[in-house]
Image (cartoon, rainbow, N blue to C red):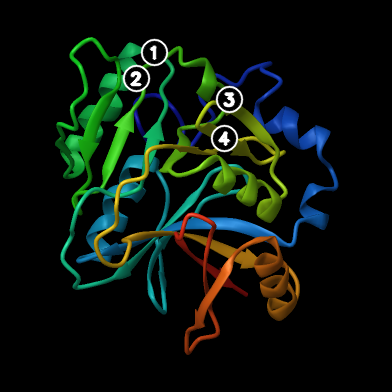
Amino acid sequence: MVGDRAPDAPAGTGDDPRSPTRAAARAPGYRARVPSRLTALDVDAHDPARAARFWSGLLGRTTVATADGVLVPGSATQLGLRFTASSAPRVGRDRMHLHLAGTDPADQRRTVESALRLGARHLDVGQRPEEGHVVLADPEGGELCVIEPGTSFLAGCGFLAELTCEGSREAGFFWSEVLDWPVVWDEGLQTAIQSPLGGTKVSWDGPITPRHGRARQRLDLTAVGDLADETARLTALGAALLGVRPDGTVELSDPDGNEFLLRV
């Protein structure tokens, strides 16, 4: 638990029409028709168990050991996190990072204090002193931001409010089609999508940092129906097929060249 909030309870929902509860009532057929569901952000880690302990402690969730790592499960409205063992050195800045939302300044302070106690550290990415968000690095060096309260863009998104990505507008619209999530923001280079049920938003903005080697992060999807049929649908939308792992997991890339996974 972070502060006085129950684990992963939506921040600032109440009667907000964007709250997960209200959104679910407006989209009763969504789960039945969507062919792929966003299950988790998959992250390479030198110590998956340690990374999972940090995030489960911060988010107030459990951990589940899997064949290829440790999962911190999400929910219908909150993104899960999967940590996979990798010995590759960390090179450069990640293209994705997480935003945590709070209800008030005291809540923001408690979240930062909890993160530091669990093993995070402060991170300087060039933020200005007058900016209200706090930038931290998790035990694996992954960037996360604890956003100042009152940010209307994240109202009703829950504690794990946003996965923000370096990427193109084209990528945002591609993922809207993949997940059947509406575009909720489209301004200049910035695009964001959100499940009809509400919860964690996924956003894209430029410029895109050049990549050196394999990316540490990738979106992790679960195919609701036939895996081959869903793979064909994704490639028709613009994904590139990269390969198939021994366990049957399909590796693809989006229009920006970012790898993602499709599982059964």
Where does residue 237 sit, x and y in percent of width and height? Answer: 69, 60
Give the mark, 2 or 4, whose residue is nearer the N terminus. Answer: 2
Distance from the alpha carbon under mark 3 to that under mark 2: 16 Å
> How packed is label 4: few (under 14 Cα within 10 Å), some, or many (20 or more)?
many
Q: Which residue is mark 1?
A: 104
> How packed is label 1: few (under 14 Cα within 10 Å), some, or many (20 or more)?
few
Secondary element under disc 3, as helix, strand or loop, is loop
Q: Which residue is mark 3?
A: 156
* Dots 2, 4 in contact, CB < 8 A: no
Where does residue 67 sit, x and y in percent of width and height? Answer: 41, 79
Give the mark, 3 or 1, whose residue is nearer the N terminus. Answer: 1
Question: Furthest-right residue in view?
Answer: 29
Q: Which residue is mark 4?
A: 192
Name the amino acid type tagged 4: Ala
Q: Which residue is mark 2?
A: 107
Secondary element under disc 1, as helix, strand or loop, is loop
Question: Furthest-bottom residue in view?
Answer: 246
The label on residue 211 is none
Q: Would you say 34 lies left or right of 158 here? A: right
Where does residue 114 sit, x and y in percent of width and height? Answer: 24, 33
